């Protein structure tokens, strides 16, 4: 037994096999750095850190599949990183954001109560990831369910929770004199909704196994659409990201309908 453990510890791992774990670690650090920016009141950089963590979360999965670098350690690290980057960090960032106007209006007594929904969100995020890990042990997942997630995935939930901040950035961009953070009750209701959607059994679209086949005569149109999207993102970043969030949220009932339709076919 000790010899087997010793061999496992001393086993050499090539650098390419470590790449997925490296990307996961960078994403984890990015999520934690978002809290640091939030403590300084730098809300845009805080949100960007969560978006960066989501990008690295996608990259680590892609690299693991391409390099066939799956490992129990990598799976556990990825799950823990997701809990922090998409559960703990968005909860703290959003809470700190609504905390400022509450303190400025001398309503500090509300903070203890307003912290509860964010605690609930972080807990739901952990429950959702634990359920995901259990469901995928031994690849015991039916083929048809691979097109859907059960509940809103953690990165998407983080993006949805941060949407009120994105809307506030848009208002500031166009000098609209309306502060969303001054209405924390609505934000709390939104956080509760996203928390429930995370742990729900509602099917949501999984784009992991999507394959896009484009006809050669339409390839130019696809490239032009990508260029247009990148241009909008560079010019009006928050409008683009907020629109993506709205489209994803609206896709949830579509996914429920499509899943039921697929189940009737089988």
Image: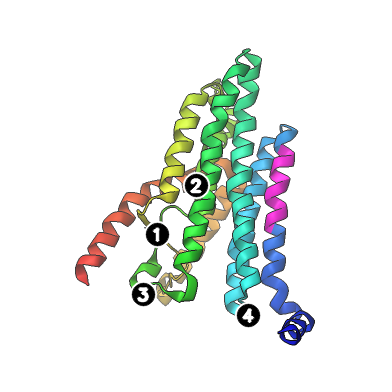
- Per the rendering, the mark at residue 205 is 1
Residue drawn at the location 63% of the way across and 50% of the way down: 84
- Per the rendering, the mark at residue 34 is none
The Cα–Cα distance between marks 2 and 1, rounded to whole angstroms, is 19 Å
- Chain-order first, disc 2 or disc 4: 4
Is residue 83 toward the left or the right of residue 145 in the image?
right
Q: Is residue 102 above or below residue 135?
A: above
- Examine the residues drawn in magenta and state their main secondary structure: helix
The Cα–Cα distance between marks 4 and 3, rounded to whole angstroms, is 23 Å
Q: Judge the density around disc 1: few (<14), some (14-19), many (≥20) Cα neighbours within 10 Å.
A: many
Q: Judge the density around disc 4: few (<14), some (14-19), many (≥20) Cα neighbours within 10 Å.
A: some
Res. 236 image quadrant: top right
Residue receiving disc 3: 143
Q: Is residue 57 visible?
A: yes
Residue receiving disc 2: 124
The Cα–Cα distance between marks 2 and 3, rounded to whole angstroms, is 26 Å
- Per the rendering, the mark at residue 67 is 4
- Chain-order first, disc 1 or disc 4: 4
x, y percent for residue 117:
51, 34
- Chain-order first, disc 3 or disc 1: 3
């Amino acid at each position: 037994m000790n010899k087997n453990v010793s061999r496992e510890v001393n086993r050499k791992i090539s650098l390419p096999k470590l790449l997925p774990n490296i990307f996961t670690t960078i994403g984890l650090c990015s999520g934690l750095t978002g809290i640091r920016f939030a403590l300084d009141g730098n809300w845009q950089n805080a949100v960007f850190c969560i978006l960066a963590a989501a990008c690295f979360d996608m990259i680590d999965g892609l690299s693991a599949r391409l390099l066939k670098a799956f490992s129990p350690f990598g799976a556990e690290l990825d799950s823990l990183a997701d809990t922090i980057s998409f559960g703990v960090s968005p909860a703290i960032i959003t809470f700190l954001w609504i905390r400022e106007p509450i303190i400025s209006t001398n309503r500090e007594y509300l903070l203890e109560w307003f912290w509860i929904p964010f605690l609930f969100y972080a807990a739901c995020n952990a429950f959702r990831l634990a359920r995901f890990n259990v469901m995928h042990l031994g690849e015991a997942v039916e083929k048809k369910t691979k097109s859907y997630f059960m509940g809103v995935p953690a990165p998407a939930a983080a993006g949805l929770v941060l949407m009120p901040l994105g809307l506030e950035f848009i208002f500031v961009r166009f000098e609209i004199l309306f502060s969303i953070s001054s209405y924390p009750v609505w934000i709390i209701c939104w956080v509760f909704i996203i928390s429930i959607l995370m742990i729900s059994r509602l099917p949501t679209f999984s784009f992991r196994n999507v394959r896009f086949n484009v006809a050669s005569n339409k390839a130019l149109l696809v490239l032009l659409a990508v260029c247009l999207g990148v241009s909008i993102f560079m010019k009006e970043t928050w409008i683009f990201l907020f629109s993506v969030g709205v489209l994803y949220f609206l896709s949830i009932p579509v996914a429920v309908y499509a899943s039921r339709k697929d189940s009737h076919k089988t």
